[in-house]
Amino acid sequence: PTLSSGSTRLVNSITHQKEELKMEETLTWYTCGPTVYDHAHVGHARAYVALDIVRRVLESQGYVVFQVMGVTDVDDKIIARAKQIGVPALDVASEHERGFLRDMR
């Protein structure tokens, strides 16, 4: 069943209020992604898949969704892992970011 305009409500994380979605608007959505110091795990997958399902449901109802996911590639955990294995921190972050994106496909 298709939802009619105005019947879908989400909590706005800025105002903490439930707001009706309007069909004429593009929904912009920022989500936090992983800190890429190690391989992806089931916690990453759960968050990624849950948000992907919400996005797909909204799109199936006719909403246009512009979603951006941040990936933390500079962090104490990344620096520590780089020192532990003797490679630059950027190499650790790049390798695990590629792995995360591959695993979540």
Image (cartoon, rainbow, N blue to C red):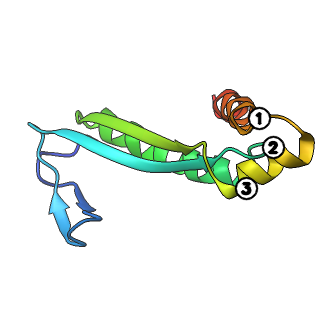
Q: Name the residue under label 2.
A: 82
**Between discs 2 and 3, the one toward the N terminus:** 3
Q: Mark 1 points at which residue?
A: 88
Image quadrant in which the C terminus is located = top right
Could you say which quadrant of the image residue 29 lies in? Answer: top left
At 91% from the left and 42% from the top, the residue drawn is: 85
Is 97 positioned to the left or the right of 50 in the image?
Answer: right
Q: How far apart are marks 1 and 3 (CA)?
A: 13 Å
Is 53 positioned to the left or the right of 92 in the image?
Answer: left
Q: Which of 22 and 88 is in front in this view?
A: 88
Q: Name the residue under label 3.
A: 77
At 79% from the left and 42% from the top, the residue drawn is: 39
Query: Which residue type does callout 1 highlight?
Result: Pro
Camera-nearest label, 1 or 3: 1
**Between discs 2 and 1, the one toward the N terminus:** 2
Query: Which residue type does callout 3 highlight?
Result: Lys
Query: Which residue type does callout 2 highlight?
Result: Ala
Q: Is mark 2 on a helix, strand or loop?
A: helix
